[in-house]
Image (tube, rainbow, N blue to C red):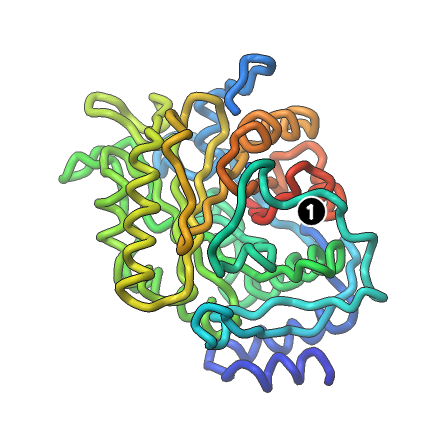
Amino acid sequence: MDPVKAYVAKTPVGPLRVLSILLTALLVCVGCGGGQESSEKEDEKASTTSEVTQQEATGGITSGETTEASGGETTTEASGGEINEGTSAAAGAEKPYTAIVVPADEASGESPSGDVLVEGTEDLSDGPLKENRLVAYYGNPLEGAMGVLGETDPETMMANLIEQTAAYSAADPERPAVPTIELIASTAQRDPGSDGSFIQQLPVESIEEYATLAEENGALLILDVQLGTLTVPEEIEVLRDFLERPYVHLAIDTEYSVDPGQVPGVDLGTVDGSEIADAVAMLDQLVEEEGIPDKVLLVHQFESGIVTNKQLIEPTANVEVVLNADGFGPVEDKTTKYDILVAEEPIQYGGFKLFYSQDPVLLSPEQVLQLDPVPVVINYQ
């Protein structure tokens, strides 16, 4: 079946999908894909210290200087593929997402030979990372300087995301990629606000808009929290209604978690592994109570020491955990950071972040998939 026809036949067409389908016909089925251009421990063997100004560029702080990111035009070629929905081994139900499947004979290269699990770990869940890879667009739709989500209208963003996702399916056909929206649900700011949290919550209506967009396009939604003086459990309670949905997952931007008397973006924050363990436990309980598909917890980190006591972080049979290497910079710095923050930490999976504008050289999907362990989450800002 023609890929677009398969896409329409397998997923109900909602009001926001029509334009996306038409664009997907051009961007995925014709064989386009690839990356936009602007055109998973701690170890003293390498320095990964970054300036707070770089921290701001990785996602938070709504006042003060930030560096603008620009998606740019898509130029990298990659084969498109059929959209494929599977069934959940645990629940016997359809998976709440749609992976882009590229036939092996249309692949842009050989599938990576490395493992996706960090050495010494296993995945006992039935979560999406067991068979798939997530390719995410990160940002706040109300702040264009905070990622690609705010640079275009939602439908154009989704079409571009589908194209970028297809490039990873072409680079590794054995692990079809899933388009994912990583939405900053709580943004750190320098103003403490009336509650003293230094957090600006994204309006529920905006979260709902992107939740609907994800659901109608077979995508996943990751809600990113930047904490400020709030705790992870507090943020989870705020977002519980959304996290109860089968296609919604959680990310923690750890560097914005500050103590009383500190200011996000001025003081570099930290999160203890015990608090992340609490988040895993809460998500695990949510899955059990609601009978929903397993969850993904994505932990952003761009420097050693930001996440402490990582030995306390343990995935469960209901929650997959990804340590995500964040921050822009030269290729050698980024890959060294990945080795230190992900490869040397026996947690579970690795994630890798790319910046369309701030990275001097934007790695191709084929290059990203040469990292060890092979990343299962790639997010773009």
Q: Can you see residue 142? A: no
Residue 269: x %, y % from top left: 34, 26
- Residue 95: % across, % down: 50, 71
Q: Which image quadrant is residue 102 in? A: bottom right
When the figure is inspected, residue 256 is found, relative to residue 109, above or below; the finding is: above
Between 118 and 327, the one nearer to me in the picture: 118
Quarter of the rendering occupied by the C terminus: top right
Q: Is residue 116 visible?
A: yes
Query: Furthest-top residue in view?
Result: 44
Query: Relative to 318, does residue 352 appear above or below in the rendering?
Result: above
Q: Secondary structure at mark 1?
A: loop
Q: Which residue is mark 1?
A: 37
Horizontal arrangement in the rendering, residue 161 relative to residue 54 (left or right): right
Q: Is residue 100 left or right of residue 283?
A: right
Is residue 70 shown left or right of residue 93? Answer: right
Residue shown at the point (69%, 74%) measured from the top left: 82
Q: Toward the viewer: 11 or 273?
A: 273
Q: Indicate the quadrant containing the N terminus: top left, top right, bottom left or bottom right.
A: bottom right
Q: Position of residue 317 (x, y in %)?
A: 42, 54
**Farthest-out residue, right:** 105
Disc 1 residue crowd, few under 14, some 14–19, many 20+, Cα 10 Å: some
For image coordinates 47% across by 32% down, the residue present is 301
Residue found 41% across the figure and 29% down from its top:
311
In the image: residue 376, left or right of residue 279: right
118 w.r.t. 100: above or below = above
Residue 149, x across and y down, in percent: 49, 54
Kind of residue sitting beneath label 1: Glu
